[in-house]
């Protein structure tokens, strides 16, 4: 209940928290979570051949949500065989204008069931409902809408008069944007005429399985989309299946390298969307308040579980003090807690394993001599949490400046000249994204030409659109997703 106090009575300091916000929880009742989920193969849900299951939990409470079938090699083989049959009998020969109708239907059903998806995503992943509701689910629907529009226009896409699909796509996705990554993978593949076997991450399988239900609801022919749940072994079995013509992977650079090595010399086409360590560069002429918001959304959006997160802040030395002062003040206003509360800014870390990794890297930052500051927010007793944290006094050789932390941790470095900013920004083995904050358009263009990053945002950060290609250089992977470029990855061109 909110306190009611007359205007003349000031709030006592210990009452301030109660004055700030009343809880605004989204209802859990909009989604019914089954006790058990099967694999989605050949248009039906079925248990794993050997009956193995694993638990998926709510990372905000550590409570089990459901048990999910764990696909073994035989299940993966059956899913790929089902996808092959569907490719040859229905989906491959189907005219693009007919395929488009199914994609539009999936997009519409996603919109209709958006609240259900948003709540389920927040329960299984730990991300704030505000983000799953306003970003993940609408963007997932937008991807299906966008690629539905391409399905009957492939011959006009600049890939020759009759571009052909590749066949069966094996797609492995991570846990940071479970439904959105499924949409990024499925929508262009299906539009181009391929059939799919999708492997969601072990900690976040539920929205992919709900999407499988949506495929059923949309009347998608059996075998066109198959979902095989499981851990790394399931993913490894899928990408190595000889019947898979195209492998699309999003995840860690380490696993991406293993996949690239395993598929070298095979006919399978591969695209890899891997890690990042992006520089978010703030110049002395940048609109400071706007830049502060961009820094915050750059690294604290989705608890920093974002491959293109602006995890290295490069701030011009002359404004470093004022930017850091304002940034610390802004971070103390971020609300960490219940992901289903609409006021929450920072949700739960997706798993204990990821929390351990963030904790270990933050400790390494302190041990190497950087200065740590964490927002003084209270941490719930149960679940996996990490407060918004920033490190100053970071040098380029520190692990926190070189390695992907994939958590709400910002490493701050300074620069004096634009040339120094470019050199520091490019001093990374990754190359996925970058941000530039300045008042001068000419400086934005000068930097964009020199930054070795697949995406460069100017005076904004973490903006996504299905029409815009996304992908990396160097150890951030190869291939592009999104836009017309994203179609090329699923066509024999
Ligand atoms: P992984 O790369 O291990 O996971 C990504 C996906 O690949 C998951 O579905 C995973 O299954 C699957 N997978 C795991 N091993 C294999 C394999 N040998 N062959 C095929 N597929 C496999 O990332 P993690 O979840 O383990 O996260 C580890 C670190 O990776 C994070 O701390 C973060 O730094 C980084 N990461 C980066 C991402 C990015 O987009 N840049 C996304 C996710 C993680 P399962 O999850 O079930 O094991």
Image: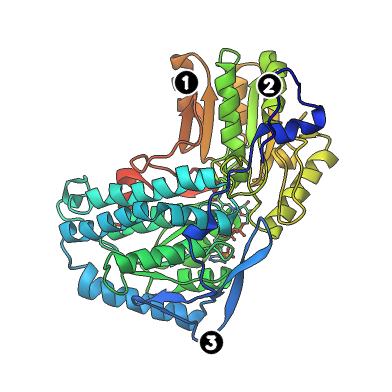
Q: Which disc, if any, is residue 50?
A: 3
- Residue toward you, 364 or 265: 364
Along the horizontal axis of the image, is 347 left or right of 431? Answer: right
Residue 200, compared with residue 388, is above or below; it is: below
C-alpha separation, residue under disc 3 versus residue under disc 2? 56 Å
* Residue 399 visible somewhere in the drawing: yes
The location of residue 278, given as percent across then percent down, is 58, 37
- Residue toward you, 30 or 209: 30
User: What secondary structure is marked by label 3?
Assistant: loop
Q: Earlier in the sequence, mark 2 or mark 1?
A: 2
**Image point (64%, 35%), residue name:** 21
Which residue corresponds to mark 1? 444
The location of residue 389, given as percent across then percent down, is 72, 37
**Image point (81%, 45%), residue name:** 363
Q: Earlier in the sequence, mark 1 or mark 3?
A: 3
**Image point (69%, 16%), residue name:** 322
Residue 150, compared with residue 458, is above or below; it is: below
The location of residue 245, given as percent across then percent down, is 35, 67
Is label 3 in contact with label 2 (beta carbons under 8 Å)?
no
Say few, some or many: other residues with alpha carbon within 10 Å of mark 2 (under 14 / 14 to 19 / 20 or more).
Answer: few
Which residue corresponds to mark 2? 326
Q: Earlier in the sequence, mark 3 or mark 2?
A: 3
């Amino acid at each position: 209940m909110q306190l009611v106090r007359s205007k003349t009575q000031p709030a006592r300091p210990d009452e301030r928290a109660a004055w700030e916000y009343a809880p605004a929880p989204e209802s859990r009742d909009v989604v019914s979570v089954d006790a058990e989920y099967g694999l989605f193969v050949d248009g039906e849900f079925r248990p794993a051949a050997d009956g193995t299951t694993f638990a998926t939990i709510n990372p905000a409470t550590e409570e089990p949500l459901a048990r999910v079938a764990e696909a073994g090699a035989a299940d993966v083989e059956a899913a790929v065989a089902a996808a092959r049959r569907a490719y040859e009998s229905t989906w491959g020969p189907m005219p693009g204008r007919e395929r488009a109708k199914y994609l539009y239907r999936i997009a519409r059903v996603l919109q209709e069931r958006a609240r259900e998806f948003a709540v389920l995503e927040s329960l299984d992943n730990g991300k704030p409902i505000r983000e799953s509701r306003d970003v993940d689910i609408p963007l997932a629907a937008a991807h299906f809408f966008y690629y539905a529009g391409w399905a009957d226009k492939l011959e006009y896409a600049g890939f020759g008069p009759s571009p052909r699909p590749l066949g069966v796509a094996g797609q492995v996705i991570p846990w940071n944007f479970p439904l959105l990554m499924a949409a990024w993978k499925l929508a262009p593949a299906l539009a181009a005429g391929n059939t799919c076997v999708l492997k969601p991450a072990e900690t976040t399988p539920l929205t992919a399985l709900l999407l499988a239900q949506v495929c059923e609801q949309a009347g998608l022919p059996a075998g066109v989309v198959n979902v095989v749940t499981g851990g790394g072994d399931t993913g490894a079995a899928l990408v190595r299946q000889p019947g898979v013509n195209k492998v699309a992977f999003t995840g860690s650079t380490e696993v991406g390298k293993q996949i690239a090595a395993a598929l070298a010399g095979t006919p399978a086409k591969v695209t890899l969307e891997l890690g990042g360590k992006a520089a978010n560069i703030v110049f002395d002429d940048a609109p400071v308040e706007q830049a502060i918001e961009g820094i915050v959304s750059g690294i604290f959006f989705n608890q920093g579980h974002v491959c293109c997160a602006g995890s290295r802040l490069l701030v011009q030395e002359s404004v470093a003090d004022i930017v850091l002062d304002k940034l610390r003040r802004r971070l103390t206003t971020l609300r960490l807690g219940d992901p289903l509360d609409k006021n929450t800014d920072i949700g739960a870390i997706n798993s204990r394993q990821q929390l351990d990794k963030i904790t270990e890297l933050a400790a390494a930052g302190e041990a190497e001599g950087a200065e740590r500051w964490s927002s003084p927010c209270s941490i719930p007793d149960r679940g996996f949490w990490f407060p918004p944290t920033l490190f100053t006094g970071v040098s380029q050789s520190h692990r926190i400046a070189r390695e992907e932390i994939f958590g709400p941790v910002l490493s701050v470095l300074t620069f004096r000249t634009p040339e120094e900013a470019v050199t520091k920004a490019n001093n990374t083995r990754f190359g996925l994204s970058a941000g530039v904050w300045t008042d001068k358009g000419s400086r934005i263009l000068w930097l964009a030409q020199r930054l070795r990053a697949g995406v460069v945002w100017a005076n904004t950060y973490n903006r996504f659109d299905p029409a815009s290609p996304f992908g990396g250089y160097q150890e951030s992977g190869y291939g592009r997703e999104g836009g017309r470029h994203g179609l090329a990855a699923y066509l024999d061109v």
